[in-house]
Structures are given as structure tokens and as C-alpha cells.
Image: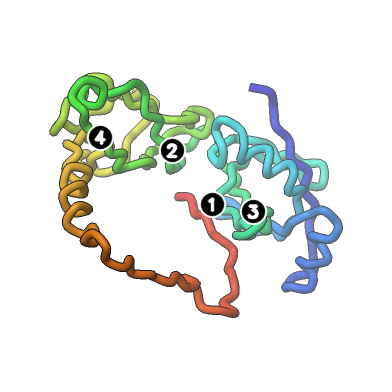
Amino acid sequence: MPEIVVSARARDERGKNANRRLRAQGLIPGVLYGTKKEAIAVSVSPKQIGAILRSASGENTLFDVELEGNRRKVILKEFQVEPIKGRLLHADLYEVALDKPIEVSVHVEIQGVPVGVKTQGGILDFVTRELDIECLPADIPDKIPVDVTALEIGKHLRVSDLKLSDKLTLLTDPDVVIVHVVAPRLEEEAAPAAEAAAPAEGAEPEVIKKGKTTAEGEEDKPEKKEKK
């Protein structure tokens, strides 16, 4: 994987007005910090941070931040996104030591089609989509693959069933269910219920008006994503 370098510069101004001026310049505010290190207010390019988030490893990407001529190994610890247009608003960068394990959350990737779905008409229920692990920064996986091809109806896979690299330590409870295959009960029960609810012949259908689901004038707040 090619080395990723994000340019950063220290900033003195704080507050909403300062952040607004910063974004008008094509930058976003951020904080650079690490264990037992003083936090530094910085500004970074949202395009560079966005490219990292869209990469295969996403927010767990290990990259360099260049600040005042010095480079530091970091990962994205937290970021904020504008909820309507999806623009990045803020990024927190966590400095890591390559020889010390860190805790991260990694997405689960389902592989294969369960036999319970393919031949038995069941439905795959994806219960747990992220797992917490501990490892060295350079060993953070892009995804945790989970093969579900052997799952029959009524069967499940738990965290304890996974066989991962010795470089990874699972922190999620071993009893947590990742996926299971269930019988399509809801679909079977929905058909007779729909028939019972159907209006008698000649009856006038009831008109239901839908209103807004959010209070008028309610302001949107930036979404916050936290990482361990």
C-alpha cells in the first residue's frame, strides 16, 4: 500500500466563526493528540481525509500527518460529518506508536451464500457488523471476513467461532452472535394478516394522511463517529 501523507498546520483561532472561515478556505478543523501528549489544534484538507475514509481500510487506515516539517503516524480517532450533504466538518487524529497495540473496531464482511438461504428458503440475519480487536497499528485488517456458506436454518455463528490471525486479539464478547439464518416466519404470517385486513368488496378504502416525522424548525446536528 502506498504511503499516505496528510499535510496539517497548527491553528490558534477557535470557535464557530473561526471554523467557518477555515472551511471557506477549503480546510477543516481537527485535533492531533496521543497518549501522554498534549493535544494540538490543527487544520487539514477534507479531500485528503475523505480519500482515506473511502479507502479499503477506511477510518482504520494508518497514515502520516506532516506538521511543521515533522511526520507522525496516526489513525482517525473521530470525525464529524454534516448530515444533509455529507461534508466533513471535523477530524481528530490519534498518534500511535508502531510497537504498541491499540484498540479499534473493524467491519465484518460476509462471504458466501448460506445453504439455509440457497436451498432451504431461510433469511440471513446480519446481527453484529463490527468487532472490537486489539493489535499493532500496522496489523489492523481492512475487514474481518466471515464465511457463512455452511449455515443452515436455525444455525448461527458467534464471535467464538472465528479463527483469526495470532496478531489479532478479539475484545468483543465471545458469545455475541454475528449472523444466523432464520425461517421466513414474518413473510408467512404477513400474507394471512393482509388478507384479513383487506376491505370487503364495495367498501370505501380508508385514506391515511402522512405527516412530517420531524418537528418543523428542528435543526440537524453533525453526526459523530467515535472509535475506541
Q: Give the CA distance from mark 2 to mark 1.
A: 21 Å
Query: What residue sits 84% from the left and 61% below the top?
Result: 24
User: For the residues carrying marks 1 and 3, which lies nearer the camera in this image?
Assistant: 3
User: For the residues carrying marks 3 and 4, which lies nearer the camera in this image?
Assistant: 4
At numbered mark 4, what does the secondary structure look like: helix, strand or loop? Answer: strand
The residue wearing badge 3 is 86
User: For the residues carrying marks 4 and 1, which lies nearer the camera in this image?
Assistant: 4
Label 4 sits on what residue type?
Ile
At numbered mark 3, what does the secondary structure look like: helix, strand or loop? Answer: loop
User: For the residues carrying marks 3 and 2, which lies nearer the camera in this image?
Assistant: 3
Mark 2 or mark 1: which comes first in sequence? 1
Any mark on residue 123, and which?
4
Q: Position of residue 164 (x, y in %)?
A: 33, 25
Within 10 Å of disc 2 (Cα), the crowding (few <14, some 14-19, many 20+) is many
The residue wearing badge 2 is 106
Quarter of the image where one finds residue 43: bottom right
The residue wearing badge 1 is 35
User: For the residues carrying marks 2 and 1, which lies nearer the camera in this image?
Assistant: 2
Q: Give the CA distance from mark 2 to mark 4.
A: 24 Å
Q: Give the CA distance from mark 3 to mark 4.
A: 32 Å
At numbered mark 2, what does the secondary structure look like: helix, strand or loop? Answer: strand
